[in-house]
Image (spheres, rainbow, N blue to C red):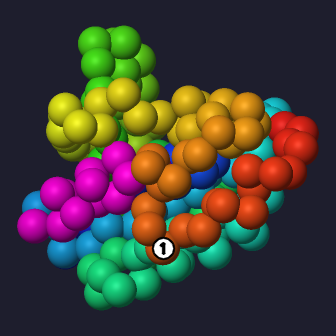
Amino acid sequence: MKIAVFPGSFDPITIGHVDLVRRALPLFDKIIVAVGINSTKKYLFEHDQRMKWLHQVFDKYPNVGVDSFTNLTAHYCKKIGANYLLRGLRNASDFDYEKTISQLNHIVGDGIETVFLIAQPEFSHISSTIVREIIIGGADATPFIPSEISIGSFQSRNFEVK
């Protein structure tokens, strides 16, 4: 069985993330969208909220699961029997960073392969970081968020990154 893990913070999930998973579905028997929990990272949205959103978006896809993990991504993959990592590339900077990480994961993960998909042009400018800034700035982020997610109520809140 070909199982891929699509790891990330998904703080918040974007339409670019969803597009990547949809495009990767024919390549794998199962894709696990997994929230990596990093105790040193500051998040805008709580872990439970991000998990809820992922379920809202992906529960309609029978070959997509949602999970979370701590520690190394490669160790999580080994634990669940995944031999592939799924990553998206928006630009050359993403490639440089992801190439290094994939090489390290290949060593630490006993041969785990990273599959890269290049972002579609209409999504290449979207990142969770940019969407967070839009939300914090009080602008409308709905064009960048999956339709299953309602963030309209966030527009009037004052956010503090946790």
Q: Quadrant of the N terminus?
A: bottom left
Look at the image and tell me whether residue 75 can be seen: no
User: In the depicted view, which residue is nearer to us: 125 or 47?
Assistant: 125
Which stretch did the figure color magenta?
A: 14-26
Residue at x-position 10% and y-position 67%: 26
User: In the depicted view, which residue is nearer to us: 43 or 33?
Assistant: 43
What residue occupies the far left of the structure in this picture?
26
Residue at x-position 59% and y-position 45%: 140
Residue at x-position 51% and y-position 79%: 56
| Residue 16 location (% of width, % of height) | 35, 47
> Is the stretch drawn in magenta largely helix, strand or loop?
helix
| Residue 132 location (% of width, % of height) | 65, 38
- Mark 1, other Cα within 10 Å: few <14 / some 14–19 / many ≥20: few
Q: Secondary structure at mark 1?
A: loop
Residue at x-position 74% and y-position 63%: 153
For disc 1, the marked residue is 148
